[in-house]
């Protein structure tokens, strides 16, 4: 779908292909992904609820795990329902603004996850290397500050990307060979100057990926 602007046409929708070439297996794919999504969603919500209501789990390690589970809930709930819908209908159209907003939520959850993993690595470092000072260093206030900072920085960085993507114009084609609105296929469809968007994406994402890798190595 396009709208006219003087002599140039601008897209208002994208066509997500999803798993269009696997339509003969759509019932099987839908069932498998739905079961996995329900199990993952239930498990992560259960972790958050247990940490909130069980006093003995109010320690830094479990607090960070609950925050990690919360980010996973946001991440999967943002992608999987739309993916299940695309499996059933064999692809579908999505307006540009909701498409970019989907990427915003995806980036927000992913960046928060990377920072939370780095925070968990720091927590384990303090527990192992400074066991006698652990309780005085990792206070409740510090836990709250670290967790809040992870969410705040993730939100800020993803919002900057959202603003840059929202400034792009799209003239065609309108086909995204994917099951969600990732930044790379969206930028490739833009008829605007996208070098600044690619540079900003790389500059913002690199530190988060680096933090996640360090956390996994440690």
Image: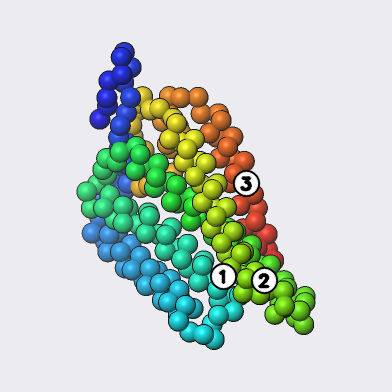
Query: Which of the two discs, 1 and 3, labels the residue nearer the N terminus?
Result: 1
User: Where is residue 119 drawn, in percent x and y?
Assistant: 63, 65
SS for dot 3 = helix
Q: Which residue is mark 1?
A: 64
Q: Which residue is mark 3?
A: 206
User: Where is residue 75 drawn, in percent x and y?
Assistant: 43, 58
SS for dot 1 = helix
* Label 1, label 3: how far apart the Cα atoms are: 22 Å
Q: Residue furthest bottom?
A: 56
Residue 47: quadrant of the picture? bottom left
Q: How many marks?
A: 3
Q: Identify the residue at horizontal 56%, vertical 70% (top origin).
A: 64
Query: Closer to the camera: disc 3 or disc 2?
Result: 2
Query: Which of the two discs, 3 and 2, labels the residue nearer the N terminus?
Result: 2
Q: Identify the residue at horizontal 46%, vertical 66% (top origin).
A: 70
User: Where is residue 202 drawn, in percent x and y?
Assistant: 59, 40
Q: Residue furthest front?
A: 141
Q: Which residue is mark 2?
A: 123
Q: Does 179 appear above or below 84?
A: above
Residue 152: quadrant of the picture? bottom right
Q: Which mark is residue 82?
A: none
Query: Closer to the camera: disc 1 or disc 3?
Result: 1
Q: Residue furthest top?
A: 7
């Amino acid at each position: 779908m396009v709208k006219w602007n003087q002599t140039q046409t601008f897209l208002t929708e994208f066509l997500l292909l999803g798993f269009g070439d696997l339509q003969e297996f759509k019932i099987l794919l839908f069932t498998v992904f739905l079961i996995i999504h329900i199990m993952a969603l239930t498990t992560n919500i259960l972790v958050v609820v247990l940490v909130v209501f069980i006093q003995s789990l109010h320690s830094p390690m479990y607090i960070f795990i609950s925050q990690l589970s919360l980010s996973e809930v946001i991440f999967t709930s943002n992608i999987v329902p739309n993916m299940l819908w695309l499996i059933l209908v064999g692809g579908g159209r999505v307006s540009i603004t909701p498409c970019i907003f989907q990427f915003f939520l995806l980036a927000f959850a992913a960046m928060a996850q990377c920072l939370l993993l780095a925070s968990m690595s720091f927590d384990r470092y303090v527990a192992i290397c400074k066991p006698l000072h652990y309780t005085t260093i990792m206070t409740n206030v510090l836990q709250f500050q670290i967790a809040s900072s992870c969410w705040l920085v993730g939100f800020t960085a993803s919002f900057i990307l959202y603003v840059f993507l929202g400034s792009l114009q799209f003239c065609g084609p309108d086909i995204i060979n994917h099951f969600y609105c990732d930044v790379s296929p969206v930028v490739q469809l833009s008829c605007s100057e996208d070098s600044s968007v690619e540079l900003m994406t790389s500059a913002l994402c690199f530190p988060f990926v680096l933090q996640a890798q360090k956390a996994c190595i440690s």
